[in-house]
Amino acid sequence: MEIRRRDFLKAGMATGVSIALNGLTLNAFANGKDHRVGSGGTDPGQWVSSTCQGCTQWCPISIFVQEGRAVKVRGNPLSKVNNGYCCVRGHLILQQIYDPDRIKVPMKRTTPQKGRGIDPKFVPISWDEAMDLIADKIMELRKNNETHKYLLLRGRYSDHNTILYDHLTKMIGSPNNISHSALCAEVEKMGRFYTEGYFGYSDYDLEKMKYLIIWGCDPVSSNRNVPNTTLKLSRLLEEGTVVVVDPRLNNSAAKAHEWLPIKPGEDGALAVAMAHVILTEGLWNKEFVGDFKDGKNQFKSGQLVDEATFAEKHTHGVVKWWNIELKDKTPEWAAGITGINKDQILRVAKGFAQAAPYCAIWYGPTMMPRGTYVAIAIHALNGLVGAVDHEGGVVTGASSPSSDYPKFDKYQDEIAKAGVKQKKIDQRGTLKFPNLASGRPGSGVSTNNVPNAILANDPYDIKVAIGYFNNFNFSGTEAGRWDKAMAKIPFFVHIVPIVSEMTQFADIVLPAALHHSEEWAISRNKGNLYGHISIHQPVIKRLFDVKSAETEIVWLLAEKLKTKGFSNVYDWLYHEYKDPETGKHPTNAEEFALYATKIRSQKAWNPTLNKDYKGDRPEGWEDFRKKGVVNSPRFEFRKKWGTPEKGNFPTVTKKFEFYSETLKKALTEHAEKNKTTVDGVLEVTHYEARGEKAFVPHYEPPRRHGDRSQFPFDLIDMKSRLNREGRSANLSWYHAFKKCDPGDVNYEDVIHINPSDAKRLGIKEGDLVKVTSTVGSLQIRARLWEGVRPGAVAKCYGQGHWSYGRIGTKDLSRFEPRGANFNEIMPDDYDYLSGSTARNGGFTGVRIEKV
Amino acid sequence: MAKKQYGMVIDLLKCTGCGACALACKTENNTQDKANGQTFNWADYITKVEGSFPNVKYSILPVLCNHCTDAPCVKACPVTPKAMHKHENGITLHNQERCIGCRACQEACPYSVEDVDSAKAAYSVISFNEDEPHGFYRDDREALKGITSSGAEIAKKAGDLPPHRTLYKHSDYANIRRKGVVEKCIFCEHRVLQGEQPYCVVACPATARTFGDLADKNSEVSQLLKKYKAVQLKNNKGEFLKPGEKGTRPNVYYIRSYQASTRKG
């Protein structure tokens, strides 16, 4: 029986209408006929340990399974990195697993032409046929001695990437294992490397901290350590001080004691002015940096200081830094550049230094042209106050146990050995791309330059490519270049769970198992002063015949190559990947995946190997599998400080460098390799510093695309707290809670514009506007938002897909995007010293017009 | 034993407006996607912006059913016995067997609207199931025929609808509400009666939510209300009750402010 509201209202709103209900039972427990209060509670189920890879934190999680289905997600209660909580992204895992647009079977393209908007007309094929086609292409490369023309493009990965991305590429015989890293956050690591010799993410002691400056990121939303920061920020808000530097009022800024709405890209000016204040006010950390021999502060604005008067301790070059860069960089000077009031600069610089060393600057990706110097200038402040490697400060963080993957070299043949020696496709190490990631020229990747290289056949063309869990046609700036380059590659294999933009260029598509719920793997990470090794395991039975990219597919390919006369890959996997518990050789893809997982984590779970470990010690593989995580012992502070005579920082001087001998060495090596001078390198790579300035933290004016008269607004590319690294657009919950990104609205994609700017341009809330940069135009709805600096506009990354499922795309059959992907109008530029893609710092000038 | 009055205290200084509580609620209670002006978000948010650049204040307020002591939704419910009713523990429960879908509760509740889109409302506590729930997983269309899946196929293969359906049992409400009835937050009574906390409380990574018996002066919620000045929502526009104003006597309280108390600049 169904009574519609209309019928009911027609009968009149009489009170006390009694409706008899017959035989409608809600479930076995409910009787629905009286006021009896009763609950059968939650039906039986099991929490299964796994790992979330919705950001770079790789949190240990547990997934609740009922009747074989994944139904809820939480942080692994044993995890010390997230205190047992997952952030909002964790819950989205469920919709990722049960996405109706998941690829069920391998498929191949039947339209030979490739391009945006060209339907590939995929048809289903068997795994056997797919692997056969791929193996044929690899054999052809081998036959023609051009295995270097094989390219592996990596997106999200686990530790097992060593097998597919690194070792397999070398077994095939190519130098071209290209990661996504330089699209993501590599510049921030430059800040640490060229001061303290550490290329990686930082960790923070939030419990003991008194003063936190969050700079160009929003750690309660994205970046890293989100659950831990979410739990611990309120203590700092209550007992300490939180300051946010960002042109946009992000979540942290909304909560903070102070917001410094800096002009986009001018961060370096603020950083050096703060250093100027800290030195002139005599507030640097004497224990870490040292002091003037006579104890009298000689850092006075505009005046040079004699280096011999200062006795430095754990740092190198503070007086050089002052003389070369800082002496004239007053708060007044910075106020004019940054748009931040000089009193606020003074107050924050002093407050920060007075809390030292129980303070930290937590800075973001700084992915902007010339960003290396921005990151170095900001991180130098952490050094100046002695917060580096100190309790309550900013630290390298703890590591976690892992065992080495078996070696492959003895299975590598001559063809492969020769191929590996060829130049890498991304042009790293050439004059224009120093990519000085770990102190050596060409040691970092320049991901976004790959399409340029492919299109120019420089150093050569690419014939066979495999990509997995990546979508560079969407995530790379000036994304149209990737469309052209991918269309040019004759044979491309994409291993993904759903069809994305990059998949549209594939010849073969292999349906991927999901990291968090459908495969065996290991991930290691750190945060909250602990390191962790966390398991990925099949939490549910796979709905379709999907396979794990980094293990199972490698095995299947090895089997197929063997049938074609190249058995080396198979021999390597079969002989070296034995089950550490039973000694058995793998006989199929699933066993290989499991054994690889046991091998990698052996040191964590094997009682004979972990007996002296000071962190968690599971009693064996099964115990580790159930618990899912091994936490390291707590990070120990001040190990890197060493003594003033002998420091432990892995820099050239073994000290924290304000004058970076480490950068000088790397730049000099790069210059010599390319037969030029350091100044010559800096000129080609678009930095302004010349001479000694190149080796100290200093201000460089932002390099901007677009003349202000034509492109008056600075574009800010912001990140969503709901983005599972850009994999959320096809999930309805993402759109239902988009308003949790400050300034954004549900079920829309918007650009934030300050109401004063909007008024001037005659733009009202919700108006469609055309946004034009030097490389293109896009249309999007305007959102009038006081939380963005006048003169800047902000747009969140994540929407604008022309191929990303029924929710993510407006019209799949016409490749019509939902929202706008601003990567399409951000120019292809770099922080060349790191090889990183520019996307921050307002480097894209735009014009806004009402449509 | 004295009568219980369950309620919740939300600490806005701890809250980061992240969305985890509302999404966790969706996974616990299997609420469907927005349709026909109904959000089906038993937990949701109101955002507020005050002032202008650079002195701008932004806050986000987590909202849910206030389980009012003078619940207008209960008064408005026309059936006998009432579908919308109070339990002895103070929770405002909804019995789906007795509900006739008249939506009088939705009209009466100061925190609900019949259509969030036409009312331009940030949220609605009560939603109405006009269609069969979870149409998304009933849809059998495939984007690429024979290659990619469909909602219906995923649900069938997984073995339930929605495929991530959390199974629980309760005497008044099912874990998925049928077509033709209203639904709203029930403080996860199926958990509370088992001695567990509501799922939004358990899932909040900021531990901003505290649930308990307001009638017990030693409970954590009572202690928080004693320690901090608290406010209650007046309506779904984000306005709070003034001191002395009773409203519908809501049992969800907000303490402290979203922004640090000593903001400078």
Image (cartoon, coloured by chain):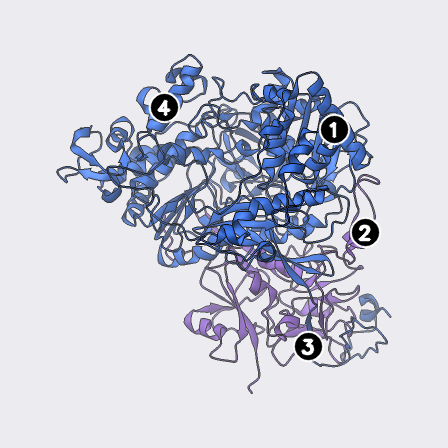
Chain colours: A blue, B purple
Q: Amino acid at mark 3?
A: His
Which residue is labeled 1 in the image? Answer: A134
Identify the amino acid type marked 2.
Ala
Q: CA distance from mark 3 to mark 1?
A: 64 Å
Q: Are marks 2 and 4 in contact (CB under 8 Å)?
A: no
Residue matched to label 3: B85
Along the line of sight, which residue is nearer the eye, A134 or A433?
Answer: A134
- The mark closer to the camera, 1 or 4, is 1
Camera-near label (3 vs 4) is: 4
Q: Nearer the viewer, mark 2 or mark 3?
A: 2
Image quadrant where one finds the N terminus of chain A: bottom right
Quote the CA–CA distance across marks 2 and 4. 61 Å
Q: Quadrant of the C terminus of chain A?
A: top right
Residue A241 visible from this viewpoint: yes
Circle 4 sits in a helix, a strand or a loop, which is it? Answer: helix
- Mark 4 surroundings within 10 Å by alpha-carbon count, few (fewer than 14), some (14 through 19), many (20 or more): some
Based on the displayed image, in which of its 4 quarters is residue A232 positioned?
A: bottom left
Q: Are marks 1 and 4 in contact (CB under 8 Å)?
A: no
* Residue type for callout 1: Ile
Q: Chain of mark 2?
A: B
Q: Residues within 10 Å of mark 1 (few under 14, many from 20)?
A: many
Query: Percent x, y for residue A624?
Result: 57, 55
Give the CA distance from mark 3 to mark 4.
75 Å
The amino acid beneath tag 4 is Lys
Q: CA distance from mark 1 to mark 2?
A: 33 Å
- Number of residues whose C-alpha sits closer than 10 Å to that of mark 3, classed few (under 14), some (14–19) or many (20 or more): some
